[in-house]
Image (cartoon, rainbow, N blue to C red):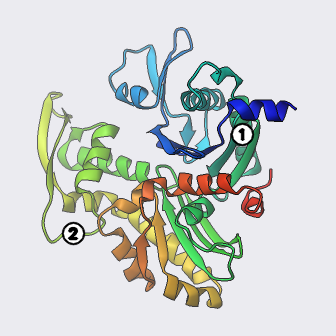
Amino acid sequence: MLERFFKIFSCDIGIDLGTTNTLVYVRGRGVIINEPSIVAINKKTDQILSVGEEAKKMIGCTPGHIVAIRPLIDGVISDFEITEQMLRYFFTKVHKGAYSFLARPRVVIGIPSGVTEVERRAVEDAVRNAGAREVYLVEEPMAAAIGARLPISDAVGNMVVDIGGGTTDIAVISLGGIVVSRNLRIAGEKMNDDIIQYVRDEFQLLIGEKTAEKIKISIGSVSPLKEKLTAPIRGRDLVSGLPKEIIINDSEITEAITPSVNAIISEIRSVVEETPPELISDLMVRGIILAGGGSLLRGFPEMVEKTTGIPTRLVEDPLTAVVRGCGIILEDIESLKEILVSS
């Protein structure tokens, strides 16, 4: 009876709870929220001031008593209560209206592969406490494969590499299960840190996280480009303490992020080496699928293909592949229950 009552006021929701961004899919409406996983808090009153895009604008611009917090680190919850508040904010945004307080949505949420039972339980509890009536967990590479419309239930090999903000998930999928997988705590945010450190060491210039990410997106590449790209970068001179602007090029960004890129490539190669021969023959035909924001770095598909000898391509709209997969599961949750993570 209660189930039927809550169903009237609730939408089914798919969530990609990322270290950098949280994306929300609503059944029948598609992806309607894509906001940073950031919460701004007043430390004096413990009051949440803003969430998502508004909170991101506050990073590096706040007085001492206001802090902008990322409640997820390396793809897992680091601050349970803040994560719960952030999810509640997104649920309210989805169900905006007179009866939003009655909403008890059914939720499918992506989690990194290889997380511990405790980390898995933390995600489930946070979603339930935020107001969900049912919670289903799915591993992110599996969700990305479903979002890419790969035949995951067939007896063929499908390889997915999902490079997010905090983690890189690499998996070979067949017959509705993960055959070989790796979870690497090196991804987009680590590359931002690499750029910050490189600029500090080479140019004695201190820059922030937002600046590093902007530079990575505008001129970032995993290998030198034929046509050079340059961009201005502004920060504080560590010698004089005064503002300073320099011009940086794509080769320098490539040099900065090479250790992180090499670590990801090495793990991809390790997964390929561990894949059974029958599935390798499938991969030679079907190729490797890249998803996540990190896969958009210039030259990344070509580097993976050159290293593994397997054709590699980007999934359509890599940033939303995981949340679209969660949405597809929502549409037919009964027949896809076998691929969900039991808790």
Q: Is residue 298 left or right of residue 260?
A: left
Give the number of marks.
2
32, above or below 69, in the image: below
25, above or below 104, in the image: below
User: What label sits on residue 10 in the rendered view?
Assistant: none
Question: Which residue is identified by label 1?
Answer: 122
Q: Is residue 175 left or right of residue 52?
A: right
306, above or below 16, in the image: below
Mark 2 vs mark 1: give the one in front. 1
User: What amino acid is found at the position of numbered circle 1 in the picture?
Assistant: Ala
Task: Give the residue displayed 50% in from the left and 46% down from the top.
Answer: 31
Q: Quadrant of residue 256?
A: bottom left
Within-10-Å neighbours for mark 2: few <14, some 14–19, many 20+: some
Residue 94 in view: yes
Q: Position of residue 294 (x, y in %)?
A: 40, 57
Residue 115 in view: no
Comparing 40 with 240, the one in front is 40
Q: Nearer the N terminus, badge 2 or badge 1?
A: 1
Q: Quadrant of residue 79?
A: top right
| SS for dot 2 | loop
Task: Give the residue displayed 39% in from the left and 64% down from the top.
Answer: 261
| SS for dot 1 | helix
Q: CA distance from mark 2 to mark 1?
A: 42 Å
User: What amino acid is found at the position of numbered circle 2 in the picture?
Assistant: Pro
Question: Which residue is identified by label 2?
Answer: 224
| Residue lying farthest to the top in this orientation | 45
Quadrant of the snapshot with the N terminus: top right
Q: Position of residue 119 (x, y in %)?
A: 70, 45
Q: Position of residue 115 (x, y in %)?
A: 68, 53
